[in-house]
Amino acid sequence: MNQTSTQQQTVALQLPLFRGERRLRIALVGLPNAGKSTLFRAVSSAAPRTGELVGTERAYEECRVKIGLDEASLIELPSFESLSPVAAKDLPALKYLLWGRDRPSVSEHEAGGPPAPFRAPDLIVQVVDATNLRGHLELTLELVELGRPLVIALNMMDEAWRKGVHVNVSALSQLLGVPVVPMAALRGQGIPELFRTVTDAARARSCPLPQPLTTRLEHGLEGLRSALDRPEISAAFRVPPRLLVTQVAQGGEYFSDELRAHFPALMPALERLLVVAARGLPRPLAEEIHAERHHQAALLYEASARLGPTHEGRNWRYWLDELFLHPKWGLLGSLGVFAAVLFMVFEVSTWLDSVTAARLIEMATAWQPTTFGGVVGRAVADGLIGLIGIVVPYMIPLVLLLIVLEETGIMHRIAFVVDRAFHRIGLHGGIAVPFLLGLGCNVPAIAAAARVASGRERVIASVLITFVPCSARSAIILALAGKYLGGLGVFAIFALTLLVIAVMGRLLARHNPNVGPGQVQEIPPYALPRLRTLAYETWDRTRDVLTIVTPLLVGGSVVLALLGHFGADAVINAAFTPITVWWLGLPVALGVPILFGVLRKELSLMMIFQALGTFEVGAVLSSLQIVTFLLFLTFYVPCVSTFAVMLRTIGRREALISVALSVGVALAVSGAVRFTLELGRALLA
């Protein structure tokens, strides 16, 4: 993102749009170990579909991918070595590339149906290993004969760079007549450019021309070509004429057998023409054609690539990418950023809270009004102090940090590295940083998630973020569990929180089976953030939240204060008895702290002391009761501010469902732990 991102822009609309039923269908092919699966996983949705090609046990994977305004169905086919002649294990893949589910007449008699349950691809993407370019170009020359648009994904360019392999991409593209896009799929580099090229090639609908064989071979195959160039044969096979000629000339069993079965009268003439084509050749015809393809691939390689000295110059951008995008060490870079966020939460934000909201709370503590007007005034003050306690120490610093991560390009790299891990809970890697921001405050975290996700992913992310222990809940856990349960107790509570988030993510993803499309994640160049952009974006991301949070926070504070003023404490405690006493096994006096905790969780800690009449909670509550109460507060509705921002980002229905879900999870987890510990204690007694 740069400064221009804050201004309205005009984007040229590319037509036709590939969406809905017209979405693009892309076949991903290549030799083994070219990086085809790596590319597929980098852009796939959280739950790609898997199936087997009919006639083989080899699996394919399919997912929808969003490419700007366009959408595509990406099919990763099994790897194959060669298509000319095609081996039996690779025949179903070739059939799909040629016909999809719409089989020609020569294939209708085959049992088991078409190889795959969807139409043939609109375009083929061949993933090529740049460090072994010569070997992959032979397959490229065969794919060209299929008569479909083709794009070369020249993968592992970073490895080629390190090994001193210099590839002239423009020259290779011109020689082949197909677009060639350099990339490094394992690092997410070049992937957006690849898919933009794919959509452009699909709109152009231009198919590459096959590379001609030697004059001698072309002349020798002329008779075979003329014999097969008949309308009835073209209608029966529906393949490019040149492909049929080379398959028959190289002894492709499938095409020869189908010709023999459907056109038996033609076979004697074809066999004589094959003998004529092979006359005078130093090797059998099939070997001669194969040798010619090998020679052509070598010439293409020599004209577009060369070996030179390995690259030694490595600037700071290279080393940053090693830190953030390296397949093995990239996670360490992400953990470093996470550590910076934790430092912001537990050091910077805590300090800001101590010099702002904490001091205001101390000043307001002395004001204990007894009149109706005074109680309302104090409640309004408490609500505004609570707002300051959210905005100043947590929202503004964390939003600023998020914008800095976006502007520098670091956030996009983190999202790419952790994408596969977040797929396990039905989300994309872009949600990782908002999740981490939730450790400070759930309010800016949910707002950030709404900016990087949409639809199903936005709802799931927002719901799960409410279970992330914000700094207020963490403070209560550390204050009570740290003192009365020890370090092991604190660790157990946080570990249980992670487990609940993971389980809830899987359940929510299963409950919402309509998985959104995969994303082609941009990896922008590194850049320094601009002060003007920081200021504008911070204001833009916080102003709407403030307008929603402020009235709810102040209004809720007034309502709860009036309940206390008119002596409704006993009524509140009595109403919460089924929860506090019957289910959680807690003193009845803790009903008020639970209810008032929806304003700010810090209030719960002070009200616990007030309700129990002592700062020594351990003298009144047992260890079991402390565990139960802390677990309930951990998963219980974070605060009214979180509910307010959810109203804005995911809508009233989903926000209310989230509240009900958090209450249900809080009751279920805390109750289950309580009864389990009581049972264990009884068995050990």
Image: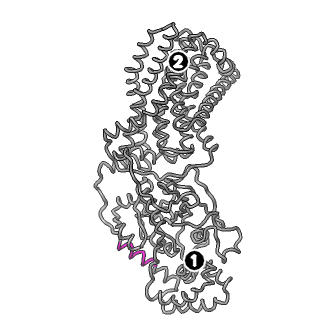
Any part of residue 421 in sight: no
- Between the C-alphas of marks 2 and 1, the distance is 76 Å
Q: Please name the predominant secondary structure of the magenta segment in the image.
A: helix
- Which residue has dot 1 on it? 239
Disc 2 element = helix
Q: Quadrant of residue 120?
A: bottom right
Three-letter amino acid code of the residue under disc 1: Val
- Is 294 magenta? The answer is yes
Residue 580, percent from left and from top: 64, 19
Left or right, residue 313 beside residue 69 = left
Q: Quadrant of residue 273?
A: bottom right
Residue 665, percent from left and from top: 62, 31
Q: Residue at x 33, y 69 (%)?
A: 306
- Which residue has dot 2 on it? 558
Q: Quadrant of residue 80?
A: bottom right
Residue 62, percent from left and from top: 58, 58
Residue 676, percent from left and from top: 67, 26
Question: Which portion, as a residue range, is magenta?
Answer: 293-303
Q: Residue at x 43, y 70 (%)?
A: 178
Observer-nearest residue: 44 or 299?
Answer: 44
